[in-house]
């Protein structure tokens, strides 16, 4: 069997935490005790620790687990590794930055690389979303965008605009702002009431959309819910509406044709800011740099994270329009801080170096176009699974797809079982509820799509 730990140090580390080497291959036995101290995020900790799935190496389209098993990455990590795994350009950029400087604060001082990254991203953002504020995650990006919306209205003399509009089946991260506008009950119910005054409009899924090819034809009218909120609460109480162009964490719900356009129109008519949460859809996932661009809508604020560094170093960002940037910065006296917001690790030079290298790969390899080119094959191949009785929908856009399974004893039971069996069969996916979510690296080729579909078919047949 292939040796998967490339360094003795790594093997020594595993031994030091009690992971025993079983034989002269590189299989390891996990016991509950050895894994106890890491409280894992969004994980059934007790079951995981009984039967862990550990990924210890990655290259191109594949991971290898701790038993040396090769696993096709059907999820690009959590759709962040858009350029594929193990890119030496990014590794080298990180190493070089660490040789030059380990950390630079960004409160009133800085490092040139953050300006370079901001310029590179501004080149690919829609419209005039040319002002980049760096954070460390998607959740921080969402809360930052919400605070920018409040600060913008405050600066222009409308401080009463404090209401946010979210949607059912939305996911905007786990911090209190994003949680308040999200619409996933499990993520909310243990954590109190969130931001006061938040309102939710409907999600965009309806039965008629099943097996749609790309953006569904039905459902643009769901945007009228926002008009009803305006009529109920008054436009002057509303700061912003948050939308994911494709809701990823609740089963790949693609915005219907005309829906985002209508949301944009209602926002413009009523002085409400439109925040597009592109944490999951950014950097080529839908076949354009951002889904807003592919759909043809320019929001006022746009969040991004995940693939900004190809998943190598935690980072996120908010892109703000010129109007928002200038309104906020011009409102403060010369020499005064304009926005009282930021993080110790905002624009960390190592993250920025990884980001610049990732942007160069995206551009040099024209990866967004490549994603667009293979999207038809990817979505058609997945749609061919509809002959399986357990498959009740296949939907997708670009290189994001959801294969929905008929519900089992409870929501998520089939999805979870499929995720586990697919991992055993050598395919990594995500499974929100009973939907199998496929978001592979944009470097995927037809044989990988075939391999993915073959594994899906094999497992779904037995579910
Ligand atoms: N917003 C969207 C649309 C997301 O998909 C995610 C993560 O999946 C987030 C926000 C939160 O990002 P993070 O997990 O980096 O905090």
Image (cartoon, helix red, strand yellow):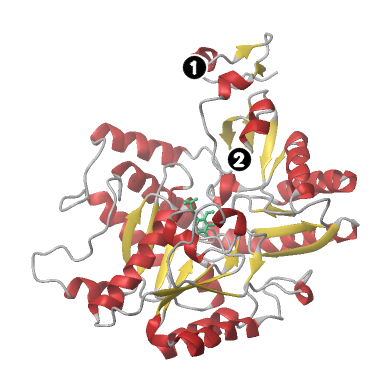
- Element carrying mark 1: helix
Q: Is residue 462 left or right of residue 65?
A: right
Q: Which residue is drawn at 63% across and 53% down?
A: 439
Residue occupied by mark 2: 43
Question: Residue lying farthest left?
Answer: 334
**364 and 62: which one is in front?**
62
In the displayed structure, 59 sits above or below 269; it is above
Quadrant that contains the N terminus? top right
- Element carrying mark 2: loop
Decide: few, some or many residues near mark 2? Use Cα within 10 Å; few <14, some 14-19, many ≥20: few
Query: Can you give x and y, in whole percent of width and height, for residue 360 in the image?
Result: 42, 52
Query: Can you give x and y, in whole percent of width and height, for residue 44 in the image?
Result: 64, 38
The answer as to whether callout 2 falls within 8 Å of ligand 1 is no
Alpha-carbon span between mark 2 and mark 1: 23 Å
Q: Residue at x 50, y 90 (%)?
A: 231
Q: Which of marks 2 and 1 is in front?
A: 2
Q: Is residue 430 left or right of residue 282?
A: right
Q: Residue at x 23, y 75 (%)?
A: 326
User: Reading the chain from its start, which is encountered first: label 2 or label 1?
Assistant: 1
Residue occupied by mark 1: 13
């Amino acid at each position: 069997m292939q040796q998967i730990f490339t360094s003795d140090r790594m093997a020594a580390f595993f031994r030091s935490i009690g992971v025993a080497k079983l034989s002269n291959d590189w299989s390891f036995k996990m016991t509950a005790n050895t894994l106890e101290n890491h409280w894992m995020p969004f994980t059934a900790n007790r079951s995981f620790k009984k039967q862990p799935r550990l990924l210890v190496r990655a290259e191109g389209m594949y991971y290898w687990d701790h038993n040396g098993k090769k696993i096709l990455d059907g999820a690009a990590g959590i759709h962040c590794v858009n350029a594929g795994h193990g890119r030496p350009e990014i590794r080298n950029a990180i190493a070089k930055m660490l040789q030059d400087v380990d950390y630079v604060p960004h409160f009133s001082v800085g490092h040139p690389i953050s300006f370079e990254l901001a310029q590179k991203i501004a080149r690919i953002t829609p419209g005039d979303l040319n002002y980049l504020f760096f954070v460390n995650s998607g959740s921080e990006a969402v809360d930052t965008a919400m605070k920018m919306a409040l600060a913008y209205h405050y600066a222009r003399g409308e401080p009463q605009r404090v209401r946010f509009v979210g949607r059912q089946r939305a996911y905007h991260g786990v911090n209190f702002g994003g949680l308040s506008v999200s619409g996933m009950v499990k993520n909310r119910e243990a954590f109190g009431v969130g931001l006061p005054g938040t309102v939710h409009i409907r999600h965009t899924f309806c039965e008629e959309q099943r097996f749609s090819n790309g953006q569904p034809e039905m459902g643009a009218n769901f945007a009228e819910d926002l008009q009803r909120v305006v009529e109920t609460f008054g436009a002057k109480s509303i700061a912003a509406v948050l939308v994911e162009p494709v809701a990823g964490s609740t089963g790949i719900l693609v915005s219907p044709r005309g829906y985002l356009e209508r949301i944009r129109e209602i926002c413009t008519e009523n002085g409400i800011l439109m925040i597009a949460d592109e944490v999951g859809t950014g950097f080529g996932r839908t076949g354009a740099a951002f889904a807003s661009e592919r759909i043809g809508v320019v929001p006022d604020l746009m969040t991004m994270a995940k693939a900004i560094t190809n998943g190598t170093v935690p980072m996120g960002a908010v892109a703000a329009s010129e109007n928002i940037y200038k309104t906020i910065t011009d409102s403060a006296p010369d020499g005064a801080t304009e926005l009282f917001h930021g993080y110790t690790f905002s624009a960390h030079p190592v993250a920025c170096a990884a980001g610049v290298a990732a942007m160069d790969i995206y551009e040099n390899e024209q990866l967004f176009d490549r994603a667009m080119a293979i999207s038809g094959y990817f979505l058609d191949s997945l749609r061919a699974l509809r002959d399986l009785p357990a498959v009740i929908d296949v939907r997708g856009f670009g290189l994001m797809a959801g294969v929905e399974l008929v519900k089992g004893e409870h929501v998520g039971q089939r999805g979870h079982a499929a995720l586990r069996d697919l991992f055993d069969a050598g395919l990594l996916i995500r499974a929100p509820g009973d939907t199998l979510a496929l978001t592979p690296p944009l470097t995927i080729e037809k044989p990988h799509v075939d391999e993915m579909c073959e594994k899906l078919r094999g497992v779904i047949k037995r579910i």
